[in-house]
Image (tube, helix red, strand yellow):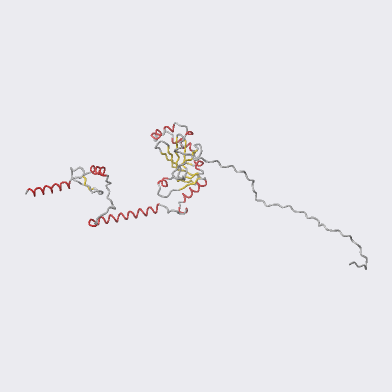
Amino acid sequence: MGTAVGEVAAVEVEVQEGKQCQECKQADWKYKCPGCERRSCGLACVKAHKARTGCSGKRDRTAFVPLAEFCDNVLVSDYNLLEEMLRQTESAKRARAPLGAPKSKMHPAMQTLQHQAKMRDTTLVYWPHGMSKRKSNSTFFDRKRKCIFWRIEWTFEGTDVRIVNSRVDENSTLRSLVEKHFETRADNVAMITELRHFCRREITDLKLYFQKEPCEGNKKIFYELDVEATVCSQLAHKTVYEFPVIHVALNPDPVKFPVLVTKPLPTATPTPPVYDVEPVFEEEEEEDPVGKFFREEEIEEGEFIP
């Protein structure tokens, strides 16, 4: 009799534990985690078990399922997973241009912008479709004004400030752009506070750097820009990946910003101009033929001379 009562009590305890929340063990469980199948009673216990076990709360769709546990729900889940993978693959193929694609497949506006940059001695290189820098590039060429409007990003050494100019006229000077960043407004008080050391300096004392592309290995080399010059002149004879990123520093730092030393080109001796003119030849005067003079003799009638 006692054994029967003990077995009934054990069954009641198991049933009671099966109904309880496995996290707090005070209330009945209401939710079951799809990831680890742990039972919980509310949001607080769900968050507590995720923080304690590191569970993501998502079911592993690629986990092995024994044949005995295989059912229609697992089959539908596998089918949906394959369909989702197929959609993502096709979307990636449409978004990314094939390697080595001819330039004719490039958008006409991108072709025009690249051509106009080349006319200004600037090599503009586009990144593959889908890259973050390709998506954020807002540089364009204005056909009416015959001008390139660049997207320029500014970083300030020693701070976390990053300023973006989405449309900068190529004829603007770097000085005018920096002065606008240092203007105090109601919406940039926090930024000006962080850039207070830059605002106290003269604009001409600041150092502006632009990274040389491409670089050999991981070695970074920079061009030092002239703050009084225009954007167009400072990007000439340089390669730009999507849009320029200008680094602003208080003092020259040869370790972090090694400057590229350009050697002056040798002065070539001027060559005389060559004109496309037909040569003129002087006419030679004809000389009188030089011969021997003979003495004329009179021949009488009837005389024979051999």
Residue 3 spot, x, y in % from top left: 8, 49
* Nearer to the camera, 97 or 170: 97
- Residue 15 against residue 173 in the figure, above or below: below
Snapshot quadrant of residue 72? bottom left
Count of numbered marks: 0
Q: Residue furthest top?
A: 200
- Residue 215 in the image: state x and y as whole percent: 46, 44
Residue 220's quadrant in the figure? top left
Establish if 24 lies above or below 286. Answer: above
Residue 111, position in %: x, y?
48, 50
- Which residue occupies the foreground of this view, 183 or 241? 241
The picture places residue 222, in percent across and down from the top left corner, at 47, 40
Quarter holding the C terminus is bottom right
